[in-house]
Image: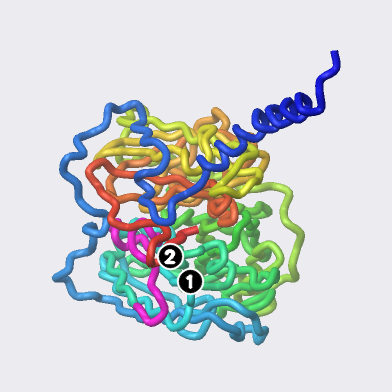
Amino acid sequence: MRLSRRAKALTAAAATVIVLAPIAWFWQASLLPDAYSVTDMGRHDHGGHMGGDEASTVPVDAFTAPADREADVRATLTAEAGRFTLASGREVDGYTLNGTSPGPEIHAEQGQLVEVTLVNANVSGGVTLHWHGVDVPGAMDGAAGITQDAVAPGGEFAYRFVAEQAGTFWYHSHQVSHEQVLGGLLGPLVITPAAGSGADVDALALAHLYDGRRTVNGRDGEDQAAADPGDTVRVRVVNTDFGVMPVWVDGAAFRLAAVDGTDVHEPGEVEGVAVEVPAGGRADLVFTMPASGGVRVNLSSAALLVGDDPPPGSDRPADTLDPLHYGTTAPIGFDPADPDREFDFAIGRRPGFLDGKPGFWWTINGAMVPEAPMFTVAYGDVVRMRIANDSGDTHPMHLHGHHAVVLSRDGVAATGSPWWVDSLEVRDGEVYEIAFLADNPGIWMDHCHNLPHAVEGLVTHLAYEGVSEPFRIGGPAGNDPE
């Protein structure tokens, strides 16, 4: 029996509704409010724990350095957008701090109180400063909409923290970070022991891509550091870009003395191997200058030349140093075999809508923003986390406010020095087990430091029970941390 023209039209309309209704529902469910608290999004994952009493809460901005203590190190950093000249003479468009990019090096001794005042001259979208790798108090983390409001043009914000960790760190904006970090709103932070680093020469090698060309300390291709034969040299490598950067040394054997600002225990001397530094990560290399000639520290397509007459550049070595088995074991201060909380952090990817936009987005434990889990802990917890990447891409994962120790990779246990990280490269198909002590109350971002990936949904948070969130994503301040 033939259907009438009207019946055919009704059937087609019904089929269209059946197809489009679920799509419309998913689109509607993906929309984010104009202003919202990150603690209201998704669901709280208590890591197998029942959860604590939330009746009494402390706002995240209450966690600060002692207000009555005078600063030992003071600096003012003025952020500005516009065209500027790199140290090598090339002109680029982007962002500067005190007229330069990278911004000024901030140096402190361990135990000193650092006070940095950020002034926004003309960055229309607002700015913040995040102290990458420094376990600052919760109010000082610089994550817009989470620990503070973005600093509007004409405004300022004072960051205060005690430099309790000695090591190599960096600072960068965490407001529209995928754009502002790429554009150069960043700089180095070095904290040394009061007795010094133990090196005759302490050199910085901060790598950044400006308009697709790699620089070292703001110089295209190469920078130089002076050193004499027999000197002990410490090179502090900082990777401010979005992808992993191989580093290798020509002209001397070296030791990987520190990773992400934490010393390696009894690092052995190596040569003819590359060290891979993830996005956001740092690596301190120590070597002795040869009796003649210089040393070349290769940073992928750029280099730091140390001393006179360094060797020419070489191809990346075939072998890569594996921190899982490098150095010797040492106590870590807690027992990861008896955790209070255990979490899974499974990275995937699937099609869908993110704030109404169709695309192929990252997922965490199968869920997309705004339904991604929030990992919830209590102060003093020993936390164990399994990170599994089955997304088809590599991800440098960065947890704010804490350092985690790597326990295993793909089921192979760590046998070397405790491998402490705040920026961990997790390649496609890899599974890491990490652990950390929840000893820094606040609300902390946990995200991919390939920052466009964070914009595409690869971001969640670590929240402490009893900590409340007074700030909002969006809102009058236009907070947009990624």
Give the magenta range.
Answer: 137-155
Residue 241, compared with residue 311, is above or below; it is: above
Residue 219, compared with residue 244, is above or below; it is: below
Confirm whether residue 176 shows in the render.
yes
Q: Is residue 183 left or right of residue 266?
A: right
SS category of the residue bearing label 2: loop
| Residue 312 percent across, percent down from the top left | 75, 70
The residue indicated by pointer 1 is 125
Residue 5, compared with residue 172, is above or below; it is: above
Residue 188, compared with residue 390, is above or below; it is: below
Q: Is residue 149 magenta?
A: yes
Out of 141 and 477, give the one closest to the viewer: 477
| Residue 71 percent across, percent down from the top left | 23, 75
Q: Residues within 10 Å of mark 2 (few under 14, many from 20)?
A: many
Residue at (52% x, 69% y) in the render = 233
Out of 406 and 469, give the one closest to the viewer: 469
The residue indicated by pointer 2 is 478
Residue type at tag 1: Gly
Residue at (38% x, 39% y) in the render = 375
The quarter of the picture where residue 191 lies is bottom left
